[in-house]
Image (cartoon, grey):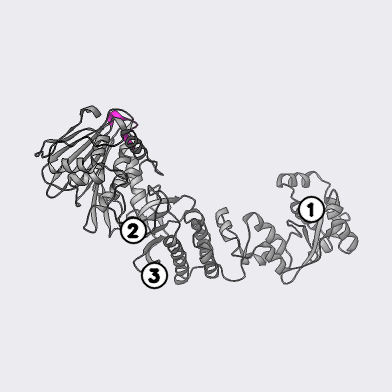
Amino acid sequence: MTARAGGVVARGGVREGELCFLGSLHELVAIGLYRPALDALVAGNGPPSRPPIDRAYLLKILDEEVGRQFGHPLRPVVELVLNAIDATIERPALIDVRLSDGSVEVTDSGVGMTLRAILSRLLVPFATDKRPGVDLGRFGVGFFSVIGLGLPDPETLALDVETGDGVEGWSLRVLAEGPEPSSLVCAIRKMAPARGTRVRVRSSLLDAEQVRAYLRDALHFFPQEHALIRIDGVAINDGRYLAGGKLFADGVSIEDPSLVARFHFGGRPLAAGISAATYHAGVKVESCLAIPELALIDFPGAVELTEGRDALKLGRAFRSTAAAFHRRLIHLSRTTNTGRRAAERLAEVAAQISALMLQSSAWSEVAPELARALLGPDRYLISPERREAIIGFLGGGIESRLFVPESFWAEREWQGFLPGERDLLERELDMDPIESLAGLARRRPDLLGLTVLVGRAERPEAVAVVLARGRRLPPGAMPCLGTRQAVLVREDAPAVARPARWSDVYALRVAFDRACGLREPDLERELIVSDPIGLGGNT
């Protein structure tokens, strides 16, 4: 099939098997854009007049549509599946995908298209008859983006569409004579009456296993009641790729009871690549490999998406869904008698999902509820690198009151919603005003351990310290703790009050060096090569 812009053949009133159009794809798009030409071709009134449309501008638009960038290069194949679902009135729709190396075929038994629909919707960029919040794909996006998927290897690209509304039947074929949209040529023929649509894409760039894995990952959580999607006869969204956990369907809006989101939490996926993810109407738009638990959040179709369906937009329905998900976690923890460790893991995962998948939407609203339900009262947020130092300074009895997130993201989300280290220290300690280490040693000669600290400091008069004592809990093994303002020294620690053993001096040296910011390797070297630790001949 070869036809350039100068050799366009367009005929009306064709019979079955006859050619209706042969020429450059952009010339066919021009006919669809120009109503008189479109009406003439559909009505069978002979060849339409050449549409008075700026070809350079039209080719620019087609170039943008064909080159449309998605979050994943195979995303156009998903668009074909979404369009097939939208075209099917029956629920659940039955969508068949056939794969082989170099070929993808998507078939539905939906309403199909007439010649007018092909010209005015399928082939016209930005044209759509989709219902916002109801339909999933958009005519035009899947068609042009699939062409772009194979255009880098034009010699192997072929796009075939067979469609009909039960009264008519039409076939459309697109080939490429070069890597530019201007090189695309198209033929339309009349077929025997048919119903439904079959789209077949051929390209050497299509690897069957890669396409299968991507479709499984993107569509395995698609609602079964809406459509059953089969790849080579095997359903991918019937739950077979989920193991364990539980699926919930929750209303997300008091004003609109029809807004329902689905949440699946717990368990493990049975297929590699399926991870914690955000879905819109069952179609994956965001994933997170950092969350080992299988946590799937499926937004209602009313949530608005950015162009190309690659990212979620923040909005009222988005926030309501995010809040409903977090409250589902709260309910889950209460109804399953979750233990402390599991509840803390829920608090960790909730914060990670908020930061990495939900853009922190509704977090400020639900975080206080999550803290009360999952962590309980009197819990303090401590970063992982400070956990050991805090327990060593305040004693092991404080550990049960610490919440130590595993990830930076969880720590970031919880900041401002839980009291932190400063609040903990102020509650647990009585503290004197800040002074220099040299001045404190002169003021409190009864604290013999201060002499050891003075000996460890190069300039004791420049070291800011705070003398502190516990209010309730006995001190831990480490008598010093570094803070941003000063080094805290526990007056009630035996190593500070009256060091009597080598271990007391060792604890003073290690705790003070760490509090002053000495790196761990340097600290180890200092302890090894320094003078032997001894008190009055006791070693």
Please state the total of marks drawn on the protein image.
3
CA distance for labels 1 and 2: 66 Å
Q: Position of residue 463 (x, y in %)?
A: 82, 54
Using residue 434 as the reference point, say whether residue 14 is left or right of it: left
Q: Secondary structure at mark 1?
A: helix
Q: Nearer the viewer, residue 267 or 198?
A: 198
Mark 2–mark 3 distance (CA, rounded to whole Å): 16 Å
Q: Which residue is mark 3?
A: 255
Label 3: which secondary element:
loop
* Among the two numbered marks 1 and 3 on one chain, the one whose residue lies closer to the N terminus: 3
| Residue type pointed to by label 3 | Glu
Q: Position of residue 133 (x, y in %)?
A: 33, 58
At 11% from the left and 49% from the top, the residue drawn is 167
- Disc number at residue 385? none
Question: Taking 518 as reference, is 194 left or right?
Answer: left
Say which residue appears at 37% left-offset and 57% top-offset: 243
Label 2: which secondary element:
loop
Where is 455 relative to 372, above or below?
Answer: above
Q: What amino acid is found at the position of numbered circle 1 in the picture?
A: Arg
| First along the sequence among labels 2 and 3 | 2
Tag nearer the camera, 1 or 3: 3
What's the magenta bit mostly, secondary-structure-wise?
Answer: helix
Q: Which residue is mark 2?
A: 133
Instruction: Name which residue type carries label 2.
Output: Gly
Q: Which residue is mark 1?
A: 509
Whether pointer 1 and pointer 3 mark residues with C-beta atoms closer than 8 Å, the reply is: no
The residues colored magenta run: 148-156
